[in-house]
Image (cartoon, rainbow, N blue to C red):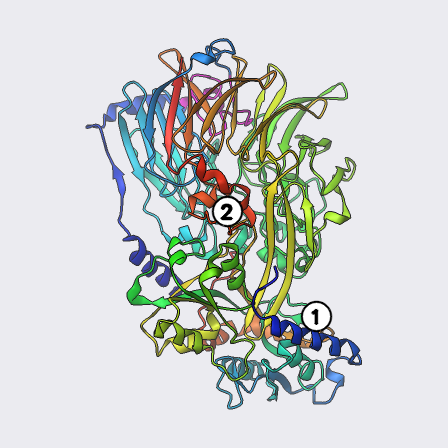
Amino acid sequence: MIPHFGLRRRALLAAALLSLSVAAPLPGGAAIGGSSSTLRVCADPDYMPYSARNGGGFENKIALAVGRALGEPVTFAWAPMRGPGGFDGFLRETLRAGKCDVLMDVPYASDNLKVTRPYYISSYVFVFPKAKHYDITSMDSPALKNLRIGFEADTPAEMGLKLRALILHADPYEIGDEEGVSPAKILDGVQSGKIAVAVTWEPSIGYFLRQRPDLAVVPVPNSRSQGSPEQYVFPMSMATRPDDGALAAKLERVISQHKAELDAILSAYGVRLYQPPAS
Amino acid sequence: MKRQAIAVALAAALFGLGAVGVAHFGGTVVPGLGNAASAQQQVSLASMSEDPGQWVMPSQNYENTRHSALDQITTSNVANLKVAWTMSTGATRGHEGQPLVIGDTMYFQSAYPNHVYAVDLSDYHIKWQYTPKQDPFAVSVACCDLVNRGPGFADGKIIVDALDGQVIALNAQTGRPVWTVKNADPERGQTLTSAPLIIGNRVITGVSGGEFGVRGYVTANDLQTGKQVWRAYSEGPDTDVLIGSSFSGAKGQGTSTWQGDQWKVGGGTTWGWYSYDPKLDLLYYGTGNPGTWNPTQRPGDNKWSMTIFARKPETGQAVWARQMTPHDQWDFDGVNEMILVDLNINGQTVPGLVHFDRNGFAYEVDRRNGKLLLANKFDPSVNWASHIDLQTGRPVLVSAKETHAGVNVTNICPAAMGNKDEQPASYDPQTGYFIVPTNHNCMDYKAFAVKYKSGFPFVGATVKMYPGPGGNRGAVIAYDPTKGEIVWSHPEKFPAWSGTLTTNGGVSFYGTMDGWFKAVDTKTGKDLWKFHTPSGIIGNPISYTHNGKQYVAILSGVGGWAGLGLAAGLTEPTAGLGAVNAAMDLKNYTNLGGDLTVFSL
């Protein structure tokens, strides 16, 4: 897929990767600075609801809960995730620079990281005014054909809209690329009528929905109706540097032993939890 | 629970949640007819299936041959075939099933909302109708249209799967539920679309939902009470897979062929057809693709996805397993039917199992032990593997057709729909040929690694499907299992997505997605007769007698994966990737809607 949107970001990412490739390889985790008895978390100072310097984001709260469970103090290394280098730039300045050892929230199976088993599963969602009563249950719902759709660029939402030619009447948002922009912006679009329906990652907007009871939220189910597999539901994990297996194992233990506490934090931030597959 | 509440609220808002329940038509239900049912109890299902006048199992018999021994309709008189009677199913989505005929009653089930009908064959009045009350949330997690593959029967009960995971036993005389169990949970991405198979006192059902990381399983419920007797997973520890002392292969592969605990989202769903050998007392079925699409995310063979399983129906214990496509990179589900016939290979007669896989190879296996005897291509265009190594059973891959994250791999044949999907083949004992409905599409496949754009996860693949060499998207073929060769090929414009039926009259029947129901000469593939039904056909023909006269019946009602562009109203020319592209012009030939059409001379 060659996305129509986000070309600017792609160029920046390429630049970031280039500079990464000339950077000296880093030695492994605990050896770099800091005490092994401190949980050192990489975080964004200004990206609610994920993280904020005042500790107000759910990643911060999750980090503190993990620290409590391990009996370790928690420190944060701050850097913007949405700076010029994007998420890779963030990793370069934080985790890979040895300034911190843990990421609280990345997709399970991410490359070049040691990810834990998922501690929550969430989904992309449709958001629209309840009063409209749109009959939207999947990307294939006919109602979408006649609606202005706002979506986060460079995500599965963009791919799903392209596969169905819905992209022709859709507007991209670049919240994940633009420092200082609140994920609530796409909800503003729905409420102002600029777009009829939004497609975005639920954890980015669940926190803002409490003040917006007029909005309906419907999960986007995975699909292969177009032949291409489309994944809208993602398991999310904590992560360490690839060679930091000992720390990852500690995090795994916290996840299995303190699941209820982590769930409660996520729920308080409007992160709806999807059940893991049966086992 | 919160999630459940949301689903229910959604359901209430969107669907009105009208309870349907049992409705009776045609006046009184005569309880005295129960005698007929109890008489049937005395006769085993296997011996009932030997009566060609009835059609008591989804695939006609435990061996899944879909062959009728009836011979009134022949190559010389089939041109006179006429419509005898028709009936609407009351549903519009994909009908992938077939009716049952037990005594003087025909039973059939529609696509979602899964109406079930009992029709009196003497005057076509509806003896009863039943529609399960379902959780409509299931609609949004059904991957490939809202299909159903028909009911099962045993011991005076009609057993039906509902899309939302219910398995319901209905009194065959009254349509009243005897028991209901829930074997799949749409909240976890699980749905039911397949036809149950009843073996002795066990009701065997599978599960759909590989797209959602569902860990596939097969469930056996007690025929009398519905109580779950066993459940065998496709991946995980041997205790979950029901691999024990009777298993012929290496232990522990349900976890050791995965990285970490990825087997927990291992896929390997079980939505195809089931068969059974009463002599060996073995149940056979295939498992689907591994749960995570992107193969680079799941190193290893990913067992037991893409596998033929043989199990003891009483306990579920696995006896042998043969994986066909290790570490699947192309989405070649292994769920297609296993047809049990005697094979004559190298001058020796062997109790065989023949399976035309999505991956384009016809697996011929000794069904006693899983030993691979022959595995030839049943479409010459197959190019992802050069051949199957008969010693190891592994495909010999063509490296240029392997998929990699970030690389657009072009012209892989077959496409993800396979050279054949669930549409069942039949076996004609007179010619020794399998009559196989096939797909003939190729694809470009580009997978993406998981990435994180600050705050937003992304993974995916784009698949573009298009007609294979020659430009036809399907064909019905005759396949000689002794030689491992195609005998004749009858090209079709669209994927041949209906089942086939062979008969002792030398005539084979099948339907096409553009609505034609066709009769061809089993020996030569020559066209003998055709009729245009109200909708495209993805159901499977059956034959039965009533008052001594032979009838042939088919459910039309297009949809399914191949027809989803039409079923879901996706017809913009620019929605040109994947399945819609492969059958986009279907709308010029047919329309949605379920109907039963029955023919006779």
* Label 1, label 2: how far apart the Cα atoms are: 33 Å
Residue ID for mark 2? B208
Residue B72 place in picture, x, y as percent: 46, 10
Mark 2: secondary structure: loop
Q: Quadrant of residue B344?
A: top right
Q: Residue at x 30, y 34 (%)?
A: B175
**Chain letter of disc 1 in the image:** A
Mark 1 in CB contact with mark 2 (< 8 angstroms): no
User: Which amino acid, by three-letter code, is at mark 1?
Assistant: Asn
User: Which amino acid, by three-letter code, is at mark 2?
Assistant: Ser
Residue A177 place in picture, x, y as percent: 56, 77
User: Is residue B281 magenta-colored?
Assistant: no
**Chain letter of disc 2 in the image:** B
Which residue occupies the extreme top position in the image? B76
Residue ID for mark 1? A112
Q: Residues within 10 Å of mark 1 (few under 14, many from 20)?
A: few
Tell me if I can see residue B12 in this picture: yes
Numbered-mark total: 2
Mark 1: secondary structure: loop
- Are labels 1 and 2 assigned to the same chain? no
Closer-to-camera residue (B190/B97): B97
Residue B158 place in picture, x, y as percent: 38, 33
User: Going by the image, does B391 lie left or right of A91?
Assistant: right
Front label number (1 vs 2): 1
User: Going by the image, does B441 lie left or right of A96?
Assistant: left
Magenta stretch in the rendered image:
B42-68
